C-alpha cells in the first residue's frame, strides 16, 4: 500500500537555532511556529561533480572522505567535516604544509572551480617570455622526404617500397643505386645491370656528346669492368670511367685528334685507378693480403665520318651496319689468355674460349698491372650503323659479330636506349652470370639535339 511521506522532526529552531525535542511544536525560546517549516528532502545526490568521488570512498591521492554517520538516539546532529579538515597531499604523495590562517573570511567567488587532481601550486614563478628554439633542419628534411611520392616496386609496379628497400606488396628487394643504371646523352645511351648471380655491380660507364672545333657533332662512350679478384673493383671501374669520360669531353672540343684523345683518356683512367691504391700505411698493415684495385676499359668515339676505339682488357666494341646484308665486325682484340693462345697458333678460337682459363686477362688498369700501351684504332665505315660497346657480361651470350647483330634491334640507331635495354635483357635471359653493361652509339653521329625516340 502506498504511504504519504511524513514530515521530519527538526533538530533545532530555524529562527534562533535553539535545540528542539522531537515533539516540540513551538520553540521554547523565541516561540517560533515549527509547523510552518517544510521538511527537508530525504533524497541524496548519487553523482559527484567535482571529481572527489562518492562519500566513504578513497580518492586517487590517498585521502579518505568520511561517510555521514546517522544521528544518535538523542537526536544530536552529526559532526560536520569541512574540506580543509582533510589531510591533503601533493602530486608526489607528501603531506601539504599548512598555510597561515586567513586574516578575515572573504566572500566566495561567484563560480568556484575546484582544482584538477594532481595539479601543484608550489612551483616557482615562470617568466612571461620563453626563448624559442631554432627549428631542427633534420626535422624539416624528414618532413620533406615524407612528402615525396612513395617509391614503387620495380617488380610488381604496385607495392610501396619500405625503408629497408623491400616491396610491401610482393616482398621483392629493390635494386641498389648501381644494381641497374641507365643514361642517355644526346644520341648515345648506356645500360648497366648487376646480373643474376653477382651480389653487386662492378661495372661502370660514362657517356657524353659534344662538338668538334668545326661545329660537327661527336659522341662518346666508356665502359669499364671491375676485376673481381682485385680489391674494390667497383671503385676502380667507377673511377676509370669518370676520368676517361671527362678527359674526352675536355680534349675533343679543343681540336685533339679523336684517336689521340682516346689514348690520353685511357692513360687518365689508369692514373685514377692507381690512385686508389695509395692508402695509408696503417691500412695496408691491416690488409696485407689485399691487392690493388683493378678494372678493364673500352671506349668509342663517333664523329660524322670517323670511328675511334680504345681498350685495355677483354671488354669489346662491335660494329653492326644498318643494312643487315652487310657483314658486322668485332673491332677489338682481347687482352686475355684465350686471345694469346689463338694469336700464337696453339688453339683455334673455339678451343681457346672453351677452356676454363679463357677469361684470364693479361692486361688491365691498376697499380699492379704490367707495362702496357693502350690499344687504339680508327675506322671509316662506308655506311651507317651502330657501335656496341660492352663488357663480357654481354658478349658471353653474343660472342661473334653475327650473334651480336642478331641480338640488337633493327632500329637501334634511332632508339639507342631501347637497344641497350634489349641487349641487357638478352644477357639476363641467357643466364646473367656476370654484370652486364652496354652502350649503343649510332654512326655517323647525328646533329646536336638528336636522341632516342
Image: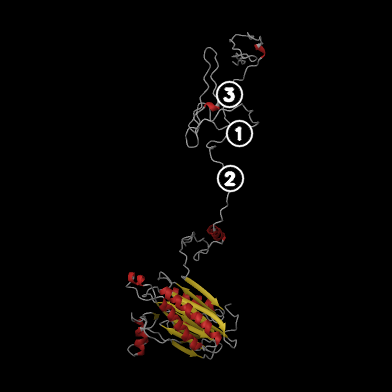
- The reply to whether the C-beta atoms of the residues labelled 2 and 1 are less than 8 Å apart is no
Q: Mark 2 points at which residue?
A: 127
Residue 252 left/right relative to 14: left
* Upstream in sequence: badge 1 or badge 3: 3
Residue at point 36%, 88% (across, down): 342
Residue at point 48%, 77% (across, down): 242
Residue 395 visible: no
Query: Which mark, by number, is residue 113?
Result: 1
Residue 225 visible: yes
Mark toward the viewer: 1 or 3: 1
Is disc 2 placed on a helix, strand or loop? loop
Report the quarter where the C terminus lies. bottom right
* Upstream in sequence: badge 2 or badge 1: 1
In the displayed structure, 47 sits above or below 254; it is: above
Is disc 1 placed on a helix, strand or loop? loop
Which of these two is toward me, 193 or 297? 297
* Upstream in sequence: badge 2 or badge 3: 3
Residue 274 left/right relative to 212: left
Report the quarter where the N terminus lies. top right
Toward which corner of the image does residue 414 lie, by quadrant? Answer: bottom right
- The reply to whether the C-beta atoms of the residues labelled 1 and 3 are less than 8 Å apart is no
* Cα distance between the residues tagged 2 and 1: 25 Å
Q: Mark 3 points at which residue?
A: 44
Residue 309 rendering spot, x and y as whole percentages? 47, 86
Mark toward the viewer: 2 or 1: 2
Residue 372 rendering spot, x and y as whole percentages? 39, 86
Residue 62 left/right relative to 370: right
* Cα distance between the residues tagged 1 and 3: 22 Å
- Count neighbours of disc 1 (C-alpha within 10 A) and say few if under 14, some if 14 to 19, many if 20 or more: few
* Cα distance between the residues tagged 2 and 3: 47 Å
Is disc 3 placed on a helix, strand or loop? loop
Mark toward the viewer: 2 or 3: 2
Amino acid at each position: 500500500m502506498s504511504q504519504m511521506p511524513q514530515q521530519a522532526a527538526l533538530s533545532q529552531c530555524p529562527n534562533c537555532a535553539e535545540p528542539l525535542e522531537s515533539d516540540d511544536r513551538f520553540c521554547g525560546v523565541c516561540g517560533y511556529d515549527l509547523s510552518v517549516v517544510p521538511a527537508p528532502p530525504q533524497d541524496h545526490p548519487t553523482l559527484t561533480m567535482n571529481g572527489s568521488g562518492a562519500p566513504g570512498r578513497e580518492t586517487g591521492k590517498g585521502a579518505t572522505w568520511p561517510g555521514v554517520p546517522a544521528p544518535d538516539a538523542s537526536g544530536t546532529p552529526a559532526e560536520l567535516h569541512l574540506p580543509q579538515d582533510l589531510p591533503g597531499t601533493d602530486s608526489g604523495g607528501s603531506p601539504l604544509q599548512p598555510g597561515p590562517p586567513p586574516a578575515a573570511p572573504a566572500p566566495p567567488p561567484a563560480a568556484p572551480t575546484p582544482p584538477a587532481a594532481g595539479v601543484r601550486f608550489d612551483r616557482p614563478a615562470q617568466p612571461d617570455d620563453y626563448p624559442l628554439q631554432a627549428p631542427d633542419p633534420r626535422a624539416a628534411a624528414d618532413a620533406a622526404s615524407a612528402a615525396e611520392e612513395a617509391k614503387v616496386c620495380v617488380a610488381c609496379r604496385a607495392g610501396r617500397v619500405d625503408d629497408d628497400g623491400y616491396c610491401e606488396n610482393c616482398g621483392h628487394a629493390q635494386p641498389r643505386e648501381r644494381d641497374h643504371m641507365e643514361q642517355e646523352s644526346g644520341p648515345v645511351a648506356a645500360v648497366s645491370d648487376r646480373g643474376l648471380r653477382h651480389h653487386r655491380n662492378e661495372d661502370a660507364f660514362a657517356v657524353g656528346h659534344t662538338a668538334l672545333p668545326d661545329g660537327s657533332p661527336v659522341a662518346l662512350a666508356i665502359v669499364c669492368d671491375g676485376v673481381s679478384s682485385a680489391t674494390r673493383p667497383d671503385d676502380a671501374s667507377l673511377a676509370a670511367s669518370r676520368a676517361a669520360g671527362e678527359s674526352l669531353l675536355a680534349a675533343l672540343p679543343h681540336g685533339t685528334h679523336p684517336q689521340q684523345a682516346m689514348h690520353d683518356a685511357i692513360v687518365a683512367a689508369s692514373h685514377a685507378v692507381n690512385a686508389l691504391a695509395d692508402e695509408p700505411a696503417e691500412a695496408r698493415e691491416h690488409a696485407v693480403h689485399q691487392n690493388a684495385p683493378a678494372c678493364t676499359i673500352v671506349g668509342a668515339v663517333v664523329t660524322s665520318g670517323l670511328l675511334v676505339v680504345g681498350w685495355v682488357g677483354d671488354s669489346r666494341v662491335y660494329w653492326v651496319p644498318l643494312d643487315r646484308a652487310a657483314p658486322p665486325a668485332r673491332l677489338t682484340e682481347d687482352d686475355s689468355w684465350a686471345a694469346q693462345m689463338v694469336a700464337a697458333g696453339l688453339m683455334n678460337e673455339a678451343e681457346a674460349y672453351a677452356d676454363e682459363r679463357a677469361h684470364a686477362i693479361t692486361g688491365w688498369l691498376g697499380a699492379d698491372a704490367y707495362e702496357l700501351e693502350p690499344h687504339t684504332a680508327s675506322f671509316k665505315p662506308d655506311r651507317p650503323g651502330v657501335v656496341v660497346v660492352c663488357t663480357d657480361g654481354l658478349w658471353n651470350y653474343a660472342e661473334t659479330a653475327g650473334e651480336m647483330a642478331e641480338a640488337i634491334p633493327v632500329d637501334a640507331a634511332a632508339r639507342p636506349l631501347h637497344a641497350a635495354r634489349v641487349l641487357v635483357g638478352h644477357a639476363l635471359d641467357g643466364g646473367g652470370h656476370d654484370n652486364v653493361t652496354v652502350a649503343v652509339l649510332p654512326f655517323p653521329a647525328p646533329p646536336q639535339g638528336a636522341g632516342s625516340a
